[in-house]
Amino acid sequence: MDIWEEMYEKAKKEYHPEEVSPFIQAHHVVAAVESESGKIFTGFCIEGASGVMNLCAERVAALRMYADTGETKIKRMIAFRNNPPKNNGGMPCGACREFFMQLNYENRNMEILTDYETRKTVILKDLIPNWWGDKRYLKNEENK
């Protein structure tokens, strides 16, 4: 079993769409991230009618990683609904891309699986070229 299959199998266990209440739905998108230390963390999407409750599966997985270990660097990520990503699927939304970039500068190099069958990936920094936060990270490094 390769790392992508392991991540897929763990995230798949989170997939069971449900209505938490008449206003909140959950578990209809799932994700897994692999931390720098090689641990895998899963997450699920939760969305409320008001909009302020919404959290993507990708961010939930990253928050679990941070809450459980304090780690902020992600090596790999997979996200999907009822089937593994295919044909450039599984792309994180803009809010998730931004969150990953802000969480750790090295996350710019994280692999995102876009096609499970071919194992095609994309690198986060390619999805956010000329990111606005680069200068802030570099300035912070210069001041150390």
Image (tube, helix red, strand yellow):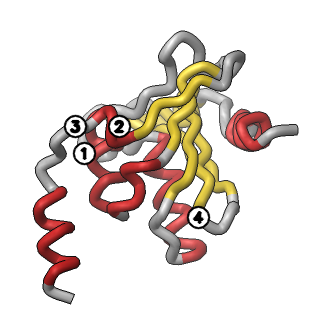
- Quadrant into which the N terminus falls: top right
Q: Where is residue 139 in the image (x, y as percent from the top left)?
A: 12, 73
**Element on which disc 2 rests:** strand
Q: Nearer the viewer, mark 2 or mark 3?
A: 3
Most foreground residue, 136 or 61: 136
Secondary structure of residue under mark 3: loop
Q: What residue type is labelled 1?
A: Val
Earlier residue among tags 2 and 3? 2
Residue located at (12% from left, 50% from top): 132
Q: Mark 4 points at which residue?
A: 36
Residue type at numbered disc 2: Gly
Q: Mark 3 points at which residue?
A: 129
In percent of width and height, residue 60 lies at: 48, 51
Cα separation, mark 1 vs mark 2, equals 7 Å
Residue 102 appears at what percent x and percent y? 28, 59
Q: Do the residues labelled 1 and 2 touch (CB within 8 Å)?
A: yes
The residue to which callout 1 is attached is 52
Rate crowding at label 2 as few (under 14), some (14 to 19) or many (20 or more) other CA atoms within 10 Å: some
Q: Position of residue 64 (x, y in %)?
A: 54, 62
Q: In which quarter of the image is residue 103?
A: bottom left
- Residue 113 sits above or below residue 124 on the image: above
Extreme-right residue of the structure: 1
The amino acid beneath tag 4 is Glu
Residue situated in front as seen by the camera: 109 or 65:
109
Q: What element carries label 1?
A: loop
